[in-house]
Image: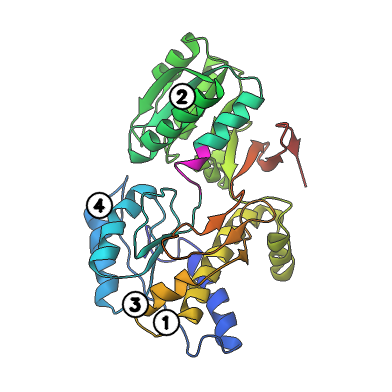
Amino acid sequence: MSEGPPGLTDIERWLRLATDELVGNGRIDRDVEFIHAWGLGLPLGTAAAVERAYASLVDQDALLVVGPAIGDNALVATPLAERYAMPTIHWAGTERARSDYMFQLQVGSHEDESIVLARHLASCGIRRLGVLYDRSPIGRRHLHFLQAEADAIGLCIAATGSLIPLAEEASSEVEHIVDADCDGLVYLGLGLSAPAVARAVRARGWNGPCAMNTAGLRGYAPEFARVIDRWAYVDMHSDSNATLATLRQRLGLPPSAGYAAAKGYDLGRLVAEGLARAPERTRLGVKEGLEQVKWLPAAEGHEGTLLGFGNRDRGALHGRYLVLRQWLDGRTVELTASGAGQQQ
């Protein structure tokens, strides 16, 4: 299942890599066929498009659905997974999109990222924080957990402002934050409105620390990275992860491919292992196979992060799977515990 026309993502490449390996060594006893459905979901499209795409895969006799990749759309797909008893793995950030048949590879987390950001900013000496967030389920969920963690650690959220997720202008909202005498600023959302926030911050001449959630992953597009230069953000890969390093060496991948490779490889292995461990080639059997995936070393996260599911456990990543990084001159730099950049 895709949120863009076929060919715009490399997910199938990673799924084929992982499944071909297990077909080759006999753990999967037949070739794996890939079918596609595309729906232009939220925020640019509609929930109905997601519903139609999902139903199309059901009608094509799929055993397992992979996708969608945006939290709002994963929430749409979750009741569909139950309705059709269709095992599904999404790689969006919301843990609310989990159910008996809906599994999650956490590429970010609406719940955990805000905790990581709050603790990071507090450790940098921030005391009065300004927050701009998308007026959407994603933005509101992030804000809820940021506020809870801020209350717990004594960090004051001095001002907040909301944006439509497709906002192209944020000058008045940034002005409100600056006027509240904040010494740090956070953006929380899908990321389409993040450039408007970053441009407004730069135009205002404000030099305080700025951070955002995994919206900063959009910086892998060079134009986006230039706009959010010097912003800290939450990523999914660490330079010290041995599983990722081995994968990059094996495939001859450059450091800039770290995020895409980590996400794709982990997703592919979950799919392949779920199929290999399925006791029968039915949708129920594939669900049971996914529940038996345990303790795979993850390419995402810090070294020691593990992949797996279980009975009622639908979140794949376990351990320190969120990694703070910063965009500097077009490069992503991992931040140490002290907040200093570390290039490798």
Q: Secondary structure at mark 2?
A: strand
Q: Which residue is mark 3?
A: 283
Which segment did they paint magenta? 108-113
Q: Which residue is mark 4?
A: 47
Q: Secondary structure at mark 1?
A: loop
Q: Residue at x 69, y 63 (%)?
A: 243
Q: Residue at x 67, y 51 (%)?
A: 302
Q: Secondary structure at mark 4?
A: helix
Q: Are marks 3 and 4 in contact (CB under 8 Å)?
A: no
Q: Is residue 288 magenta?
A: no
How many neighbours does mark 2 have within 10 angstroms: few (below 14), some (14-19), or many (20 or more)?
many
Task: Count the labels in the image.
Answer: 4
Q: Which residue is mark 2?
A: 131
Say which quadrant the N terminus sits in: bottom left
Sequence-first tag of 4 and 1: 1
Sequence-first tag of 3 and 1: 1
Q: Position of residue 89 (x, y in %)?
A: 42, 63
Q: Nearer the viewer, residue 107 or 11?
A: 107
Q: Position of residue 314 (x, y in %)?
A: 44, 59
Which SS type dominates the magenta stretch?
A: loop
Q: Are marks 2 and 3 in contact (CB under 8 Å)?
A: no
Amino acid, disc 4: Ala
Sequence-first tag of 2 and 4: 4
Sequence-first tag of 3 and 4: 4
How many neighbours does mark 4 have within 10 angstroms: few (below 14), some (14-19), or many (20 or more)?
some
Q: Residue at x 42, y 14 (%)?
A: 176
Q: Is residue 120 above or below residue 242?
A: above
The label number, if any, that marks residue 33 in the structure image = 1
How many neighbours does mark 1 have within 10 angstroms: few (below 14), some (14-19), or many (20 or more)?
few
Spatial distance from mark 1 to mark 2, Cα to Cα? 45 Å
Q: How is the image coloured?
A: rainbow
